[in-house]
Image: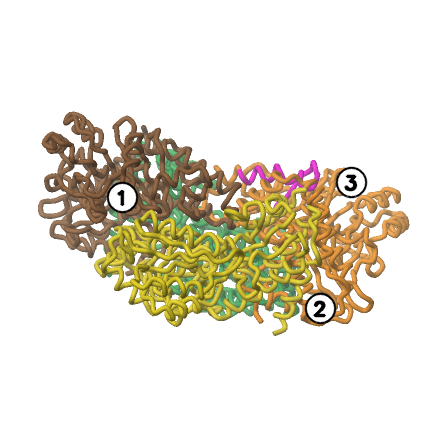
Chain colours: A orange, B yellow, C brown, D green
Amino acid sequence: MKLNRGRMLTAMPGPSVIPDRVLSAMHTAMPNIYEGTLVETSISIFEDLPAIARSSGHVFMAISNGHGAWEMALTNTLSRGDAVLVLASGRFALGWGDQAKMLGAQVEVLHAPDRCPVDPGAVEERLRADAKHEIKAVLVVQVDTASGVWNDIAAIRRAINSAGHPALYMVDCIASLGCVEYLMDEWGVDVTVGGSQKGLMVPPGLGLVWASGKAMAAHKNADMRAPYWDWTARLSEDAHYLRYCGTSPIQHIYAMRTALDMIAEEGLEAIWARHAIFANAVRAAVEAWSTKGGIEFNIIDPAHRSDSTTTVLGGSIDADRLCHLCEREAGLTLGIGLGDFAGHAFRIGHMGHMNPPMVLGTLATIEAALKAMDAPIGASGAAAAATVIADALVN
Amino acid sequence: MKLNRGRMLTAMPGPSVIPDRVLSAMHTAMPNIYEGTLVETSISIFEDLPAIARSSGHVFMAISNGHGAWEMALTNTLSRGDAVLVLASGRFALGWGDQAKMLGAQVEVLHAPDRCPVDPGAVEERLRADAKHEIKAVLVVQVDTASGVWNDIAAIRRAINSAGHPALYMVDCIASLGCVEYLMDEWGVDVTVGGSQKGLMVPPGLGLVWASGKAMAAHKNADMRAPYWDWTARLSEDAHYLRYCGTSPIQHIYAMRTALDMIAEEGLEAIWARHAIFANAVRAAVEAWSTKGGIEFNIIDPAHRSDSTTTVLGGSIDADRLCHLCEREAGLTLGIGLGDFAGHAFRIGHMGHMNPPMVLGTLATIEAALKAMDAPIGASGAAAAATVIADALVN
Amino acid sequence: MKLNRGRMLTAMPGPSVIPDRVLSAMHTAMPNIYEGTLVETSISIFEDLPAIARSSGHVFMAISNGHGAWEMALTNTLSRGDAVLVLASGRFALGWGDQAKMLGAQVEVLHAPDRCPVDPGAVEERLRADAKHEIKAVLVVQVDTASGVWNDIAAIRRAINSAGHPALYMVDCIASLGCVEYLMDEWGVDVTVGGSQKGLMVPPGLGLVWASGKAMAAHKNADMRAPYWDWTARLSEDAHYLRYCGTSPIQHIYAMRTALDMIAEEGLEAIWARHAIFANAVRAAVEAWSTKGGIEFNIIDPAHRSDSTTTVLGGSIDADRLCHLCEREAGLTLGIGLGDFAGHAFRIGHMGHMNPPMVLGTLATIEAALKAMDAPIGASGAAAAATVIADALVN
Amino acid sequence: MKLNRGRMLTAMPGPSVIPDRVLSAMHTAMPNIYEGTLVETSISIFEDLPAIARSSGHVFMAISNGHGAWEMALTNTLSRGDAVLVLASGRFALGWGDQAKMLGAQVEVLHAPDRCPVDPGAVEERLRADAKHEIKAVLVVQVDTASGVWNDIAAIRRAINSAGHPALYMVDCIASLGCVEYLMDEWGVDVTVGGSQKGLMVPPGLGLVWASGKAMAAHKNADMRAPYWDWTARLSEDAHYLRYCGTSPIQHIYAMRTALDMIAEEGLEAIWARHAIFANAVRAAVEAWSTKGGIEFNIIDPAHRSDSTTTVLGGSIDADRLCHLCEREAGLTLGIGLGDFAGHAFRIGHMGHMNPPMVLGTLATIEAALKAMDAPIGASGAAAAATVIADALVN
């Protein structure tokens, strides 16, 4: 029976739920694009975004999605023929590496063991072996939404330092910014890549790149540079529109301003804490459902399960049918398994604009669908998750 | 810890969640109010509303809330000094009776036993005793959102008929229309009162009254008539604005049109079935939570618990604290106990634009709050409710 | 040829253009109706509205249109059989008087001469003749949108005082509040009636009444009182919803808050000055178009033409065809002639959320339509109006 | 005096006014991005867009602005070292050429005479001289919003054909699609570039490229290809998101669908005719204002003045002050003079979602501002424009 009549709820690992306040901010008559309120608003965003990554460097904002932001990061810092080390622990660092390859880089992939995070020790070992420092950049994601892994960005930096290697350290935080602690300066990251549509609570359409001083220096010699993405042109003070290489993303500027206001009202540390609690609730549910041959976490080490996305292996159950049942009958959109996971896993996004009814509603609906499929499940995940939330409410 | 950051969810027994589609329909530039699209849209609503109450009579739509609709119903059909019998089973028939009294009626209240519905036998007995037929109207609500009771409107009509009494039969369906089966013609109701803001999924601001032929006949001799509410003026064909006694409720007309489209897309019978399932889920949760001295249903007879609102007695727990915890920390608004119930009960609305994530999210959040308060609860209500939904999903 | 594709523009004398900011404020998830943000916002509106009428008294806000506000004003202050003097200078005081009659008052109409404002001298004379002070209330509108007249409310108060008459002085400002200077306390008005949908820039759905101390005293003895409108109940401190006699108009509360913020940002005096300039522009256009046998102002005395609405007699031209041409081909909605004016006049509203492109666009479009109809017009009204705006821009 | 309170009106040459219907369509809860409604809607757009350019080829839609679309067009069809002929008649073909240069092309500019369109004869001559066919692409804009010129795309194609030259013919229609007749197939254009934010009535954020079979063939050998823009990847049938190289532009998909519906409702030919009339009205106003030493058209030949943008030389008047006066005091945003025109010209956009009140309101407000500045103007432009509209209304 179709019960999917209320407001559709997404628990995909992004694009996540956009607040009404953000959507309403987009409903505004067209402004002057050369001066006045829009330009001032845009400038305020460029001023506020560095703090979101705990960075003191430059931030660039392109009309694009995350793949565009990847391309901006690569083309502005690398030259054709440069060697790039991709630290794979899921799907997205690999995709980024594919881009680098098409752009002319020599790409080498260091695979994490199956269902595991990137191993800093292996990174150190590989970089030590690169005595001539031919590797110009190391690419990694903080959270991979395919595998659900959380990589320890600070530990990988320590590994790079231990190897005494000068490569640029480039981190994709598309699925973690605004969800999970991230300290670009303190952790020594050179290039951070982000997108608008996950923890930042803005519709897809803005690709974000933060650059350290070292990245800006590398930019000077990069020969992959392309006009649309070019940092030098975007830093020009001649006209504000140059920051966007042309017409500015008017509705998205209003949206981003509103989202940044909401982030400031709650506080980034409080946001990280809230995400940790919701992630605990999700994990408590998955733990409760888990059985031999049934549901289990993809990421084996509990310390490396992401606070913004959980990937669940379906075992004997048909994960795609689960997703369809949730969406078509119950109005809940889950993430399907990506790549090798297709049909064998489902993914729960827990990022951004969330509260207990949304998170618990997601979990209890999954539980209902699992029961409807006669899936072998252990205890009630909804009950377990409610207990986690209960503990948080009183503290 | 404050976790209330996502989209606020209301589980008050109205005003209920308004669909985005309805809210977006209200964001429209001001139209011509004398002719064209707005007037045509308004006419289409007047044409479609009778079927919502399964009525073949007239419908009137006033810019007002439900109290205004009450007043429209009374002033158009009664005269000062008329006797009115109020069938009380909660709070709202009493409030309607208070209005009748201030308007000049002689009001007599027939109370249902505590925590029980109106007893048709008692109604029949009282009306038989009114040999002179001094009672001109019988007032009752189908669902009382204070007590959570569902009254059997068809059975009460049979009681009136058994007594051979000619009083107008007036039913308040504000909290039940669009949620619960209601057959105005078939059940012999003379006046039905509704509001926009519950099962009809439109913001508060429209009071609705359906009138049978018998009610229209009574209207001719009513001396309580007042210009703003007057049916005769509103039926005038001279100009469309007369239907609203002045400026029409433009944004609400767009909203109501959209809501009626959504109702037509799902089908009223399917809507009733969906509400029944969600009500079963809510009741399964309350049942699971119930303990001696703890939580229990207000309405004793399961057959008379409403499919749109559930009133829960808190027993030893502080119901107001529960509501505050849910709202301020978790982003879920419940209904507080009204009147005598204040502080001793809470209410769960399950009406209108709902799906499993919303209903189960509501219940699991209540469970989390109950646990946070160390309330004595039995089993997991969230798990029990998920089981109910699971059963519905496969059927 | 149909050119009506852009945003529809209304120049009806209300409902007027609603700002996007106001409409976006209405797109908000359902809040708690018993406490918290909604109630605080509502309270802030009750605190801010008196200043809009320059009143120190109470303000009441009903879910209704202006006709409802009329009824609230009458029922709260009068008793059946009371004599009421209606000062007619168009259509709306008469309509208000009709309401009073149906409610049981003895209504006497004092007609202004054709195409003229209310004559304070005649008012004084009539009241002097009422030696027994049987007249309990004097009803007048500040601006009548049918005739386009502006009545001198201060002068009429002086006339009442000269006659030494104690009648309540009740003024309908529905079409003038937020457009034209209005000083309730200073001018000694006892009851002011307003609506949301004109100068206040909020969709129709809120009826407003301001009451002086004298009006509140009269309220104590009024026997027309009705529950929905009753001031005593609405002043109860028991619960906030009593101020609205039931469910509060949630979306309209958000809308009104936003509109009042916008009014505060501009300043009421600045708003009056802006309206005066736009009215001058409209009048300059009508003056330019005027010819013998052609277009002319309905109100003869320039000092009594309203700053919010201009009624234009069409002379030999078909005013309804003009309105249709503007709307159906050009996307501009004008006011048609009301009542006796039907077909013989058209009306231009110039109230609320307006700027030079909107006002001049209205006038130039009317000019285009007049030319398209081969109407006999004098000089270019668009050019004349632009000159008025030019003068204002440099000052 | 500040009169800028109503809805801001933009008459910039884009981004143009976005219809409420389009903005409301963007206010929708996050959908499934992998299947269902969003994907179906996206597919329908890819199906409908070719007809907008009267093309039977492929269309590509990137999350970007027009500059991004330029880059997509170039990188997919050219190789480093290729010669490119830029036909300059304003500012934008030059900007496109600058991009080509940075991407590695050899760029040669053929300048049109000052204030004139591209001369097809000069194009033919230059191409004949390229006996070795080293020029691989010819770049031109249909409408240049800096100069206000309209280039004759069909005539330039005939010139290329007369020269028997095989270069790709690439046309920027960003400022003309949805405004001005454009027949890609019939005129033999190989690559058409568009953007969402002008005639297509969608917020900035979508870059569009249409490719002929010849362009697709050239793509196979292009070495400028970059992953984000790559056509081959975007044509993959593996997954829908590949069409956007990653996360799809959800809100813009809803917006574009709505805008295409509106275009279909009116009909593209009717849209072109409507734009022609409004352009005539604008030109009639500028003609009327023109004086010796005062205002004049930038483009000398009336047949080459664009139907979507008019560039006006200010002569002795301070064009920037005019723009400021219109915007800050009157709520009308004009286009300032770009590049060499800065301070010496202003620009009027007349594209997209427009009707007579908007166009005439724009012109009459400019007239008011000119008068406020004591600018030497001839006759009333507002009156002249109204006459043009009048003629259209009766036909």
Mark 2 or mark 3: name the one nearer the start of the chain.
3
Both marks 2 and 3 on one chain: yes
Does the residue at mark 2 contact the one at mark 1 (Cβ under 8 Å)? Answer: no
The label shown at residue C224 is: 1
Q: Give the image quarter of residue B300.
A: bottom right
Image position, residue C362 (x, y; %): 28, 46
From which residue to which does the magenta span run?
Answer: A41-63
Q: Which residue is mark 3?
A: A188
Q: Which callout, 2 or 3, points to the residue nearer the camera?
A: 2
Does residue A51 belong to the magenta stretch?
Answer: yes
* Element class at badge 3: loop
Amino acid carrying mark 2 in the image: Ala
- The C terminus of chain D lies in which quarter of the figure? bottom left
Amino acid carrying mark 1 in the image: Met
- The N terminus of chain D lies in which quarter of the figure? top left
Q: Chain of mark 2?
A: A
Total residue callouts: 3
- Cα separation between marks 1 and 3: 78 Å
Amino acid carrying mark 3 in the image: Gly
Q: Give the image quarter of residue D58.
A: bottom right
Q: Is residue C142 left or right of residue D272?
A: left
* Element class at badge 2: helix
- Cα separation between marks 2 and 3: 39 Å
Image position, residue D333 (x, y; %): 41, 42
Does residue A69 belong to the magenta stretch?
Answer: no
Q: Chain of mark 3?
A: A
Q: Residues within 10 Å of mark 2 (few under 14, many from 20)?
A: many
Question: Which residue sits at x=32%, y=64%?
Answer: B131
Q: Is residue C130 left or right of residue C15?
A: left
